[in-house]
Structures are given as structure tokens and as C-alpha cells.
Image (spheres, rainbow, N blue to C red):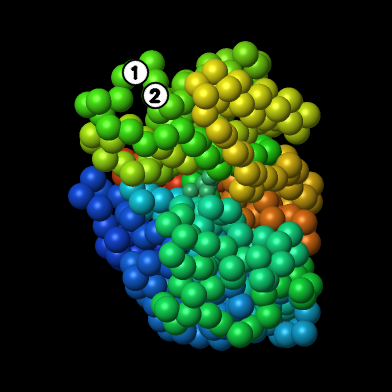
């Protein structure tokens, strides 16, 4: 990996060591299709957390767990009272996720620390590496909730009392169950800047032959839970004309939402990815269906218009089918623009390292979208194969991952300064 050589200091990340740590982490929750399934606050997430904590301690970091279970590894600076320069991402994954989504940003931060240790360099400001709890929001419907509490977007009680999808437990109880109900303050203190390294989860960098993406921002997102209520009935005796079939109603709503997306240019992305059916029995007409809507668009006004139409569509289908429908917003975030100085720092570091870099916009949400509310924030994207993510086939090249990590080292040291 190109060495950062400026004003008499050099520090080079070790791409092989980064790759090994990614592969070691990917063994935890490895799925048959070559991905990972480390859903937040499950025992597999705990195992990944424990491994990360052991690596942090091995790298000489002081480790604390905050009230939302965020793991923070701190590397002291010469001026240790200065606000830290922070990096991080998430070790939790989708149920059939990829080996790099989230884990890359956490382990790239660790590799930066290891490289600085190898070089014997001490930064002026302290550095902190974070694993954010439950970025994906698979079990606890909000997503990026822990970085949201840290950034003051949600209050602590809301975060800890988030119920899981089955309604059987809460995020706070699960933190306690896996031993990560920390007592350190969750945010509420100044940080100098936040940088998150992440795979692009889209095709642009690969398509354009760029190694580094300087991320300008992320599109807005609105999520809902739609509850469709009809009436259970016998599959063999209830005539079709007399049915109030919640599944048929939900299916018509989902089909309509998919068609709605194509009424707009640029098209939004609308996903109805989670469905719960009651009683979920082959020979009972479903009486209740709850399904999710995840709608995203790069223009907040257009997204608001899309959501009005989406909800009207659901109410219309319900009325036609003699069904009840209740729609609750579960999470939402306006479009985010990252800090211009952080974006420029990424571009400049890539240029110094001779890496092809282009500006990109994130279709995915990230913890960085929350942290931008409280501190200058930037993201570093690297390509992933065919832009595939949230899929066991997610793949990234070791060289690209190493390059993104070297850029991360550069921008963190530039911001933290050297003793
Ligand atoms: O859904 C998202 O955008 C993120 O990958 N959790
Ligand atoms: Mn993800
Ligand atoms: Mn992610």
C-alpha cells in the first residue's frame, strides 16, 4: 500500500492484516452462501463484538461501552483533552448480509490504529473507533438508532425501549442479555470530526473505474409499518365474494407501491421487505397482515409527495376490500449533505495517494448521516463487485479496501494532527 509520507512521518496500513481481520470477523455468523448473518444483539452479534473488543485491547485502545451498547476504542492523543477524531461503522448485518457492509468501516478504523502503532506515531488529538449498535434495524425497526441517540436525534429511553418485531423484548433488555448494556455516556460530548469508510453498495465506482468515492451525502428515507385487518376464515368454506382477506389487500397495496415508484423521475426506491401474517396458516384466510414500507429519494419534497400518494393508495385498497388499515411511521430522515471540508479531505488524500477518486452520492443510509448533525462528517466509499450488497454475494477487492483504509488514515491524521 502506498505509504503516507509527509513532513518526516510515514504510516502505511497493512492491507493483508486488514483482509485477515475482515475474514476472521466474517467467520462469525458465516452463512452457506458466503455471506454473514450477525443480526443486532443476537449471540452472533455478541461474538463479533467480543472479538472486536479483544482486538481493540490488543491494539492498546482503552475500551468503553456506552448506554446504547456502542463500543468505543480510544487511542490517547498528546493533547488528550482535545475532542477526538472518530471513525467507525457497524458489525451487525442483515440476516443474509455481506462480509463487508459495516464490518469494513469498523476494521478499517482498527487498522488505522494498528498502522499508527507500527509507525510509533502519536496524534495530537485522541482517536476513537466505534462499533455502532444495530445500524441495520432488522430486529428493532428504526435502524441507525444508537448513533441517533449519540447524535441527540433520539432520546435514550426511546432507543432502549425499542421493541423487537415479535414484541417479545426490547433493545435495552437485549443489550443486558449479551452483556453490552454499558454505562458510558452515549454522546453529548464534542468530537472533532467523524469519518466512516464503507463499501459503496452501488455500481458507480466500479463502473467508472474509481477506487475512492468522496461521498457528498445520502438520500432521504421514510419507513412505515402498515397493518391491514380483515377477518380470518376457513379456506374451504368461506366463499371468495364474502372474504375480507388481509393478505390479498396487502398484496394489492405492495403491487401498487411498486408501480407508484415509476410515476416519478428520478424514480424513488420503494421496498416492502418485511411481512408478518396472522395466523399464517395454509388453510385459514389471513385476518391480519403487517408489512413494511421503506421509501427513499434524493429530494425531500418529492419524497414527501411520494409518501402521501403511497399512504392514500393503501387506504384506497383497504376501502375497496372492506379492510381496515393503520399506518405508522417507524423512522425517517431527510437527505443529508456531508461536511465540505471532510469531503475535500477525502479527495485530497486520494490525490496524494494517486488513487482515482470521484464524488458519489449514497443511496444507502449510514450512521454517518446521524453524526453529521453534531460534527463535521465525511465518508470514504470503495467499490464493491457489481454494486451488490445486503446479499451474501457482496464482494470487494482487498486492494480497494486497503486503499480506502489508507485514505482513512490520512484524513484522520490530517484532522487530529501529530504530536
Ligand atoms: O438500509 C440502509 O440503507 C443501511 O444499509 N442500513
Ligand atoms: Mn447495510
Ligand atoms: Mn452499512
Instruction: Tell me which residue sits at (60%, 78%) in the image.
Output: 66
Neighbor class of circle 2 (other Cα within 10 Å; few <14, some 14-19, many 20+) is many
Percent coordinates x, y for residue 116 in the rendering: 55, 74
Reply above or below: 32 against 286: below
Q: Residue 232 — which label?
A: none
Q: Residue 240 — which label?
A: 1
Q: Is residue 254 left or right of residue 319?
A: left
Query: Which residue is identified by label 2?
Result: 243
Instruction: Tell me which residue sits at (42%, 78%) in the image.
Output: 177
Instruction: Tell me the SS state at disc 2.
Output: loop
Reply above or below: 27 against 289: below
Reply above or below: 309 against 356: above
Neighbor class of circle 1 (other Cα within 10 Å; few <14, some 14-19, many 20+) is few
Residue 359 visible in the current orientation: no
Q: Is mark 1 within 8 Å of ligand 1?
A: no
- Which residue is at the front of the view, 265 or 263? 263
Percent coordinates x, y for residue 183 in the rendering: 61, 85
- Cβ atoms at labels 1 and 2 below 8 Å apart: yes
Q: Quadrant of the C terminus?
A: bottom right
Instruction: Tell me the SS state at disc 1.
Output: helix
Reply above or below: 112 against 120: above
Percent coordinates x, y for residue 413 in the rendering: 67, 67
Q: Is residue 194 left or right of residue 250?
A: right
Percent coordinates x, y for residue 238 in the rendering: 30, 25
Instruction: Tell me which residue sits at (73%, 85%) in the image.
Output: 80
Q: State the image quarter where residue 61 is shown.
A: bottom right
Q: Is residue 381 left or right of residue 176?
A: right
Inter-mark Cα distance, 1 to 2: 5 Å
Residue 35 visible in the current orientation: yes
- Which residue is at the front of the view, 334 or 240? 240
Instruction: Tell me which residue sits at (26%, 40%) in the image.
Output: 281
Amino acid at each position: 500500500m502506498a505509504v503516507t509520507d509527509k513532513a518526516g512521518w510515514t504510516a502505511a496500513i497493512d492491507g493483508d492484516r486488514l483482509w485477515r481481520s475482515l475474514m476472521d470477523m466474517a467467520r462469525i455468523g458465516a452463512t452457506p452462501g458466503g455471506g454473514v448473518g450477525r443480526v443486532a444483539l443476537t449471540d452472533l452479534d455478541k461474538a463479533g463484538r467480543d472479538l472486536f473488543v479483544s482486538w481493540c485491547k490488543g491494539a492498546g485502545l482503552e475500551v468503553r461501552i456506552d448506554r446504547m451498547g456502542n463500543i468505543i476504542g480510544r487511542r490517547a492523543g498528546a493533547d488528550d483533552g482535545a475532542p477526538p477524531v472518530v471513525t467507525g461503522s457497524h458489525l451487525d448485518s442483515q440476516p443474509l448480509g455481506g462480509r463487508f457492509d459495516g464490518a469494513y468501516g469498523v476494521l478499517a478504523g482498527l487498522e488505522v490504529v494498528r498502522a499508527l502503532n507500527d509507525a510509533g506515531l502519536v496524534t495530537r488529538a485522541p482517536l476513537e473507533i466505534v462499533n455502532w449498535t444495530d445500524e441495520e434495524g432488522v430486529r428493532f425497526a428504526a435502524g441507525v438508532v444508537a448513533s441517533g441517540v449519540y447524535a441527540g436525534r433520539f432520546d435514550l429511553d426511546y432507543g432502549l425501549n425499542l421493541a423487537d418485531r415479535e414484541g417479545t423484548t426490547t433493545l435495552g433488555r437485549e443489550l443486558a442479555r449479551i452483556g453490552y448494556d454499558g454505562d458510558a455516556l452515549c454522546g453529548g460530548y464534542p468530537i472533532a470530526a467523524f469519518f466512516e469508510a464503507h463499501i459503496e453498495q452501488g455500481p458507480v465506482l466500479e463502473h467508472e473505474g474509481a477506487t475512492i468515492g468522496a461521498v457528498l451525502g445520502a438520500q432521504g428515507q421514510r419507513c412505515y409499518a402498515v397493518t391491514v385487518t380483515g377477518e380470518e376464515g376457513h379456506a374451504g368454506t368461506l366463499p371468495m365474494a364474502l372474504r375480507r382477506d388481509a393478505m390479498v389487500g396487502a398484496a394489492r397495496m405492495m403491487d401498487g407501491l411498486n408501480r407508484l415508484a415509476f410515476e416519478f423521475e428520478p424514480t424513488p426506491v420503494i421496498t416492502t421487505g418485511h411481512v408478518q401474517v396472522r395466523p399464517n396458516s395454509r388453510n385459514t384466510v389471513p385476518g391480519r397482515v403487517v408489512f413494511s414500507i421503506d421509501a427513499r429519494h434524493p429530494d425531500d419534497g418529492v419524497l414527501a409527495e411520494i409518501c402521501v400518494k403511497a399512504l392514500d393508495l393503501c387506504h384506497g385498497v383497504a376501502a375497496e376490500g372492506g379492510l381496515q388499515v393503520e399506518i405508522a411511521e417507524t423512522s425517517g430522515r431527510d437527505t443529508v449533505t456531508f461536511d465540505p471540508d471532510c469531503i475535500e479531505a477525502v479527495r485530497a488524500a486520494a490525490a496524494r495517494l494517486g488513487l482515482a477518486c470521484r464524488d458519489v452520492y449514497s443511496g444507502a443510509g449510514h450512521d454517518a448521516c446521524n453524526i453529521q448533525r453534531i460534527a463535521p462528517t465525511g465518508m470514504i466509499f470503495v467499490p464493491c463487485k457489481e454494486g451488490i450488497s445486503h446479499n451474501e454475494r457482496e464482494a470487494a477487492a482487498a486492494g480497494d479496501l486497503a486503499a480506502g483504509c489508507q485514505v482513512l488514515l490520512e484524513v484522520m491524521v490530517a484532522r487530529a494532527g501529530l504530536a
